[in-house]
Image (cartoon, rainbow, N blue to C red):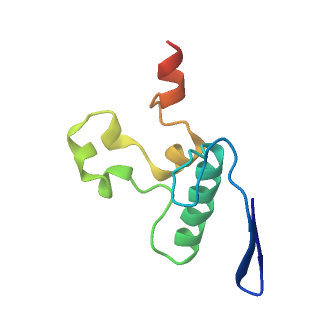
Amino acid sequence: MLVMQNGRTIFEHYANGGSASGRWPVFSGTKSFWGIAALAAVHDGLLKLDDLVSDTITEWKSDPRKSQITIHEMLNQTDGIEGESRLKRE
């Protein structure tokens, strides 16, 4: 938890051994952030949701499946790529 007032930090607490400089996986929070960022980029004319991800991640161009995935599919999680947490359960 971080509490700020007038630009100054007045309280900080990190649960489960966390710290201000440590990394913490936010999973769904990350998905929400990138969805909003993508829509802002669409609004600004920087990309279209039907653009191919491989236009940005050029390493995907040589993969027959990944080369056809759109930004829209990535954001909706309908791209067919297995997530890390799902792979760990198998």
Kindly identify the residue that appears in the image at 27 percent across and 34 percent down: 64
Q: Relative to 75, is 57 on the left or the right?
A: left
Q: How many marks?
A: 0
Image location of residue 14, percent across then percent down: 68, 53
Relative vertical location of residue 74 with respect to residue 50 in this rendering, above or below: above
Residue at position x 58%, y 71% in the image: 40
Which one is in front, 46 or 10? 10
Judge by depth and name the residue closer to the eye, 21 or 48. 21
84, 8: nearer the viewer: 8
Furthest residue in direction top, as rendered: 90
Q: In which quarter of the image is the N terminus?
A: bottom right
Q: In this view, does 32 lie to the left or right of 38?
A: right
Up the image or down, 3 lies above or below 49; here it is: below
- Where residue 78 appears, as percent x and y from the top left, is 54, 36
**Residue at image coords 44%, 48%:** 70
Looking at the image, which residue sits at the far left?
A: 62
Can you say whether 50 is above or below 79 in the image? below
Location of residue 61 by image quarter: top left
Q: Look at 31% across and 42% down and name the residue there.
A: 67
Quadrant of the image occupied by residue 25: top right
Q: Which of 11 and 80 is in front in this view?
A: 11
Left or right, residue 37 beside residue 50: right
Tell me: residue 2, above or below residue 29. Answer: below
- The location of residue 71, given as percent across then percent down, is 47, 52
